[in-house]
Image (spheres, rainbow, N blue to C red):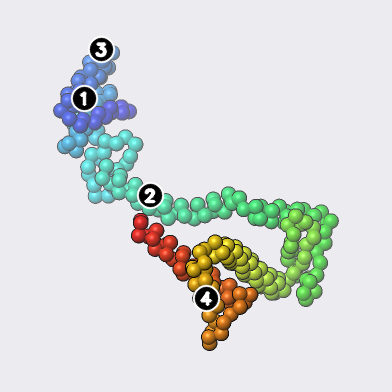
Amino acid sequence: MAYPLIVYAFSSASRRIAADLRAHQQAREAQRGQSTNVYPVIIYDVALGNGAGEGVVRRCSYPGCSRPNMRTRANYCRQHGAEASRRWRARRAADRQGIERERDRKRSQDPRRIAKVRAHAKLSTYLRRGKVKKGRCFGCLSTEVQAHIPDLHQPLAVEWWCTECRRDNAAEREAKRIAAAQERARATRQAAWIEHRDAVLSAVAALPAEERVGLENAAARGPLGIRLSPESPMYVQQLVRAYDQRYLRTADASSADTT
């Protein structure tokens, strides 16, 4: 079977070069004593979109399309090949989401997840060898239990829970986790307030006497006309608030004007 030599012609110069190439091919085959049609040369004129020369021109395999297909590694013409590529990329993109999720799950480098997998693998090995026995549920003494490892660094210190008790225990642990997170957030806010309060008190002490007295008088005004003492927590809060309103907001406004 003779495979045609396909030459893409983009201009008149390239068409002349392709014609010379075909003539040279025919002359070389004639010198060898072979038929000039053994290796036909097909010139594909890109501007006209057709093929000219010896040999059989392949057609596009798309249903209803009869355009010549000069692409040796494709079954469709250029237009339908691009359309088929777009459809394939769309299908691949839809499948790629699931593939990437699975890949990310397998390649996850979460230290807690890795420690959990290793701890349960070690526990499974000890259970299979009979060195660890399943116990009863810590809540209801049921024999249908699941393993729970509180400390992943000690996989043999296992707790056994049934499904219902473990669900209740998980809810209790989640409540404790939320309470601990709230406590950490409260402690963070308290530490930020103490740091800001100390900075403001130092800044107030360095102010001129008139400005400092004005801030102290504003901070001493309590509810219902009561005058607060400097040792009162409300006095300190109002002093910090008055300083922020007078100086920090002024500084923010001036910086906004300059920008």
Which residue is located at x 59 percent, y 51 percent?
108
The alpha-carbon separation of the residues under discs 1 and 4 comes to 98 Å
Residue 105 falls in image quadrant: bottom right
State which tag comes first along the sequence, 1 or 4.
1
Q: Which mark is residue 31?
A: 3
- Quadrant including the C terminus: bottom left
Type of the residue with mark 2: Arg
Type of the residue with mark 3: Gln
Q: Nearer the viewer, residue 222 or 26?
A: 222
Type of the residue with mark 4: Asn
State which tag comes first along the sequence, 2 or 1.
1
The alpha-carbon separation of the residues under discs 4 and 3 comes to 114 Å
- Foreground disc of the pair 1, 3: 1
State which tag comes first along the sequence, 1 or 3.
1
Residue that carries the numbered disc 1 in the rendered image:
18
- Mark 1 near mark 4, Cβ–Cβ under 8 Å? no
Q: Residues within 10 Å of mark 4 (few under 14, many from 20)?
A: some
The alpha-carbon separation of the residues under discs 1 and 3 comes to 20 Å
Q: Nearer the viewer, residue 134 or 56?
A: 134
Q: Which mark is residue 89?
A: 2
